[in-house]
């Protein structure tokens, strides 16, 4: 039955294209992680695991890893909760729905160059944010958002949540829109309030989109680059550097073999985290 | 109904798009082949010319000169290109301006995949360190323009000239100061560090913040060390020893002293409170505001703010530059020269050489210098410098009181060093730790480059 | 019905008001950009939220003067549209079989696609692949690359949503004598409408604004897309913010239009859902 009605050839275009254009070059690329490939020398020598040993030696790297993990977890939670709240609010019978959805999606479209510059000004010690905070008497909260080593990672995460929530909102909206109205009508007639409606009816039916959103934000969180680079360039010093800014710096310095090695490590880490999260969420899908 | 429409709609759209893309594809392939292999077309045109029997007259080839440019679009570039095109109608140009942050990545990728543009604009020091000039770029030392250079030494990489330089030397780097503040408080130009500190003290007492730091920008955070480290190495063989792995930075006490001097401005309260979060764009308004006395900057100060004519004019008139007084009676540190480099694998080497020669002519260089005044690269081209630059020229350059900056003297790439300086100003590293970390990095980079002695 | 509507009226408008207020706060950085595009260079450099003292349209004229807007716009449109059509078709078809035919081969395929989300693009090996195919520096290469890079996300999205479409529907269609293609296009695709348009929004925005691929794979600036030319106005030391803002507004208009248009189709997905129920 399956063979006839769910044919393999449906997958051929996607798989062939993907294998040829993406998988092959990436695997070749990973091969370079085991060499001393750099810009100074045309010859490439195989060096085994030496690059990886150097990675473990590097002190700055521990800070990077911590920052990356913090960023990934924090933004995952922030983006999804806000995205979900927005989607719920904007799926109800509001008049200005489309306009509001567009407004909340706009930050997603904005290019990072501008985000970097505008937010640098907004978050400047004498910028818009601190001025407003002082004006309402919350002066103790007017911190050095981008210059204080202890706060900078938090600041960068908030900016990312602002920029990314709209993306998740759009996916949640698509999911909520697929729920037929009769379900929520029926539960209302049965006397359920909004919260119960959400947890018992809507959430189970949108579990797939929850999985998608969590996985996507985790991956994007671990792969973070532009947000940090354009806001702080990993600074001050190394306080806000993440794994990809280090890779970038290494590629810029010409030590490509090392850069690729860190890339490979990052890939393995994210892949492992993703697979674990995927398995966990799949179980939850079935449960709920 | 809807389903049937849907089913028709998609395939029809598909067919249209496929037709479109294949049409574009074949159109591209035509332009593609004419761009990437002008030789194929020249063979065709030559054959076409050969056909009508006699005429051995040379029909000029259609060529496109590609160039990578690393700042915003400049009008003089368009002007010079248009002038050349009017004299050589068979030549087209493609000026590519891309993300400056990824400029080096793009260049190194394109070198590795052997499809770099004919020309790139870059600075001599970076090309020397990162791009193996001998292997990747054409030696231009024998070109006529190279004989007219005012200061060829600054453009040379290991004895040869690989670029057409835009200036004789880089900009002067030192301490930019507000002339009015200095004259009001009757402060002398500090000839050494003690005089500098006493001037700071006097300014502080009058409620003026002596130093302005814009340490958010790595290239600003490095300016004090950049200009003082080389003062301590002048006339010694310290840098040679370091580059040959015979000496480490942390073992040179003067280096730690120089870094500490810079850090002390912050520690002794002579610096602005937002030193870590201020970006370079705030320097112009800051130095003109009367609240700050000095900032580590350079002779490009007016040019950097040229977008705002009023600020630029005021900077040129109201500020001046003195060499960072790390030692007694210091020389002025000079930055690196920018120029156009010709790629070795270019298919139009001769045409590009002609173009560079054309660019270097006085009537064209003067157009460039009008828009962007720099110290003239050529002996026969005069430049009208702004007051700030003229002052530096009179006091330091014409007297030969100049030296190359630290970044030019170390054999490896300094990106990491800028971050270490920021760490220092943020209080995360002591000067000694900065030097130790830098030594480690130098070793790593030198080994990767397989420099001799490492 | 009228009763419940009346009951809902009061709380609804409060929520609406709240959302509008939050929306405006959310919008502040974007307003800086929009207002800035009408300011002079001096004013734009001050990054404030104030209205421009005099609404300048010069910045927009500058953009049209300095950039060949028509050609770059065409480049953008061709590449984005072509890519999206193929992305949707390839990924929805592949996802269908991956979900329905739940065997180890398909699970492996799924994991391979997901790993594509995690891995970053390696420029040099990929460039060499295109050089070997003699496709380097062509728009076709860019389109192929966009498709390949979007597949992981699209497959991920589609598989998630196809799971929520009951198998019984396909089986009913098969019993009725429909072929795989008929079932796919006739039953599944209409039900996937919200997801398809969501993917269109996301892919459109990414491909339209992308600068990485033109920068590394299109070495002829005649083939560049609109976002690439922003660097004519922005560099390390010089920034004409007012023109940059105007440029950004211009680039973003099509993306917003696609978003708004697609929203209508997403809403109409309810119809399909209701019919199915």
Image (cartoon, rainbow, N blue to C red):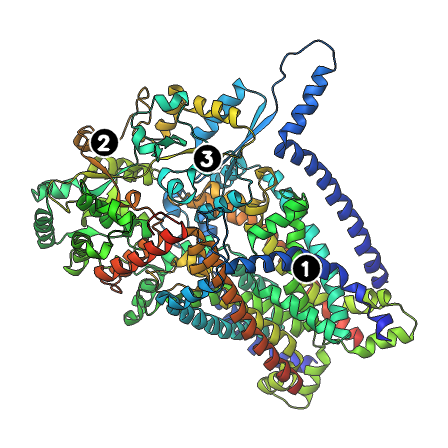
Foreground tag (3 vs 2): 3
Marking on residue B387: 2
Q: Secondary structure at mark 2?
A: helix
Foreground tag (3 vs 1): 3
Q: Looking at the figure, which quarter contains the C terminus of chain C?
A: bottom right
Numbered disc total:
3
Q: Secondary structure at mark 1?
A: helix
Q: Looking at the figure, which quarter contains the N terminus of chain C?
A: bottom right
| Left or right of residue C7: residue C191 | right
Instruction: Return the residue at label 3.
Output: B137
Foreground tag (2 vs 1): 1
Compare residues C22 and C130 and report the one nearer the observer: C130
Compare residues A38 and B96 and report the one nearer the observer: A38
Mark 1 — on which chain does it sit? A
Q: Residue at x 53, y 60 (%)?
A: A108
**Where does the image place residue B226, in percent across and percent down from the top left?**
25, 47
Mark 3 — on which chain does it sit? B
| Residue A151 sits in quarter | bottom left
Q: Compared to A91, does A228 lie above or below?
A: above
**Where does the image place residue A198, in percent across and percent down from the top left?**
61, 83
State the separation of the CA atoms marked 3 and 1.
Answer: 36 Å
Q: Compared to A34, does A215 lie above or below?
A: below
- Number of residues whose C-alpha sits closer than 10 Å to that of mark 2, classed few (under 14), some (14–19) or many (20 or more): some
Q: Residue at x 22, y 60 (%)?
A: B432
**Where does the image place residue B51, in percent across and percent down from the top left?**
74, 15
Q: Are marks 3 and 2 on the same chain?
A: yes
Spot the residue most to the front.
B453
Instruction: Return the residue at label 1.
Output: A19
């Amino acid at each position: 039955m399956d063979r006839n009605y769910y044919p393999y050839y449906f997958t051929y275009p996607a798989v062939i294209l993907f294998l040829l254009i993406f998988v092959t070059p990436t695997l070749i690329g990973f091969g370079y992680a085991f060499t001393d490939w750099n810009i100074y020398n045309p010859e490439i020598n195989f060096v085994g695991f030496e690059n990886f040993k150097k990675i473990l030696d590097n002190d700055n790297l521990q800070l990077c890893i911590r920052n990356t993990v913090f960023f990934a977890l924090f933004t995952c939670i922030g983006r999804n909760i806000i995205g979900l709240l927005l989607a719920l609010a904007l799926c109800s019978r509001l008049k200005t729905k489309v306009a509001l959805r567009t407004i909340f999606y706009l930050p997603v479209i904005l290019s990072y160059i501008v985000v970097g510059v505008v937010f640098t000004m907004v978050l400047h010690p004498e910028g818009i944010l601190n001025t407003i905070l002082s004006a309402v008497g919350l002066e103790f909260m007017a911190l050095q958002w981008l210059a204080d080593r202890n706060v900078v990672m938090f600041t960068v995460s908030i900016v990312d949540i602002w920029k990314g929530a709209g993306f998740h909102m759009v996916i949640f909206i698509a999911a909520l829109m697929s729920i037929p109205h009769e379900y929520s009508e029926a539960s209302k007639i049965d006397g359920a309030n909004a919260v119960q409606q959400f947890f018992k009816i809507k959430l189970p039916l949108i579990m797939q989109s929850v999985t998608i959103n969590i996985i996507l934000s985790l991956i994007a969180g671990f792969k973070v680059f532009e947000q940090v680079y354009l806001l702080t360039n990993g600074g001050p010093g190394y306080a806000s550097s993440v794994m990809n800014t280090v890779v970038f710096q290494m590629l810029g310095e010409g030590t490509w073999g090392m850069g690729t090695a860190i890339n490979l490590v990052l890939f393995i880490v994210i892949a492992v985290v993703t697979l674990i999260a995927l398995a966990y969420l799949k179980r939850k899908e079935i449960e709920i | 109904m809807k389903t049937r429409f849907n089913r028709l709609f998609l395939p029809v759209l598909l067919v249209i798009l496929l037709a479109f893309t294949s049409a574009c594809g074949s159109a591209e392939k035509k332009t593609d082949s004419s761009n990437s292999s002008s030789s194929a077309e020249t063979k065709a045109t030559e054959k076409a010319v050969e056909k009508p029997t006699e005429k051995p007259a040379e029909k000029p080839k259609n060529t496109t000169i590609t160039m990578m440019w690393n700042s915003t679009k400049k009008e003089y570039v368009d002007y010079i290109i248009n002038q050349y095109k009017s004299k050589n109608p068979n030549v087209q140009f493609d000026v590519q301006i891309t993300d400056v942050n990824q400029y080096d990545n793009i260049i190194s990728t394109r070198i590795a995949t052997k499809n770099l543009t004919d020309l790139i604009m870059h600075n001599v020091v970076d090309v020397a360190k990162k791009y193996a000039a001998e292997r990747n770029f054409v030696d231009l030392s024998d070109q006529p323009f190279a004989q007219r250079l005012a200061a060829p030494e600054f453009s040379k990489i290991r004895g040869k000239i690989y670029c057409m330089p835009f200036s004789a030397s880089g900009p002067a780097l030192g301490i930019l100061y507000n002339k009015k503040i200095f004259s009001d408080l009757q402060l002398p130009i500090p000839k050494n560090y003690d005089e500098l500190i006493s001037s700071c003290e006097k300014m502080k007492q009058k409620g003026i913040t002596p130093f302005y730091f814009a340490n958010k920008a790595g290239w600003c955070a490095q300016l004090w060390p950049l200009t003082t480290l080389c003062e301590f190495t002048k006339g010694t063989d310290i840098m040679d020893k370091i580059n040959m792995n015979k000496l480490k930075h942390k073992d040179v006490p003067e280096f730690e002293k120089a870094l500490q001097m810079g850090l002390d401005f912050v520690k002794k309260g002579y610096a602005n409170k937002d030193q870590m979060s201020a970006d370079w764009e705030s320097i112009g308004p800051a130095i003109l505001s009367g609240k700050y006395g000095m900032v580590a900057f350079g002779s490009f100060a007016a040019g950097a703010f040229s977008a705002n004519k009023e600020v630029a004019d005021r900077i040129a008139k109201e500020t001046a530059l003195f060499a960072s007084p790390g030692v007694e009676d210091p020389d002025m540190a000079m930055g690196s020269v920018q120029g156009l480099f010709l790629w070795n694998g270019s298919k139009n080497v001769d045409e590009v050489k002609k173009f560079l020669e054309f660019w270097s002519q006085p009537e064209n260089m003067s157009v460039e210098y009008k828009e962007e005044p720099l110290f003239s690269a050529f002996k026969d081209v005069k430049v009208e410098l702004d007051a700030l630059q003229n002052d530096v020229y009179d006091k330091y350059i014409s007297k030969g009181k100049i030296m190359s900056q630290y970044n030019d003297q170390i054999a490896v790439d300094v990106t990491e060093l800028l971050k270490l300086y920021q760490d220092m100003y943020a209080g995360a590293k002591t000067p000694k730790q900065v030097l130790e970390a830098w030594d480690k990095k130098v070793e790593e980079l030198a080994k990767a480059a397989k420099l001799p002695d490492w | 019905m009228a009763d419940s509507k009346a009951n809902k009226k009061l709380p609804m408008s409060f929520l609406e008001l709240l959302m509008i207020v939050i929306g405006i706060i959310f919008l502040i950085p974007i307003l800086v950009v929009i207002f800035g595009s009408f300011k002079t260079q001096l004013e734009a450099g001050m990054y404030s939220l104030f209205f421009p003292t005099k609404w300048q349209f010069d910045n927009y004229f500058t953009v049209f003067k300095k950039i060949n807007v028509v050609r770059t716009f065409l480049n953008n449109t061709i590449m984005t549209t072509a890519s999206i059509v193929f992305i949707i078709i390839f990924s929805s078809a592949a996802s269908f079989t991956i979900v329905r035919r739940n065997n180890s081969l398909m699970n492996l395929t799924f994991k391979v696609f997901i790993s594509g989300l995690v891995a970053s693009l390696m420029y040099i090996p990929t460039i060499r692949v295109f050089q070997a195919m003699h496709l380097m520096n062509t728009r076709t290469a860019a389109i192929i690359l966009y498709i390949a890079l979007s597949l992981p996300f699209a497959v991920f999205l589609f598989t998630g949503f196809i799971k929520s479409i009951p198998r019984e529907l396909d089986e009913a269609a098969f019993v009725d004598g429909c072929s795989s293609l008929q079932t796919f296009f006739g039953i599944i695709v209409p039900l996937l409408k919200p997801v398809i348009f969501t993917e269109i929004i996301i892919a459109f925005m990414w491909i339209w604004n992308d600068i990485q691929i033109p920068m590394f794979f299109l070495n002829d600036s005649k083939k560049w897309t609109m976002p690439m030319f922003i660097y004519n106005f922005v560099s390390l030391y010089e920034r004409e913010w007012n023109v940059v803002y105007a440029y950004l507004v211009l680039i973003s208009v099509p993306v917003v239009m696609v978003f708004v248009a697609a929203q209508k189709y997403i809403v109409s997905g309810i119809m399909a859902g209701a019919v199915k129920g």
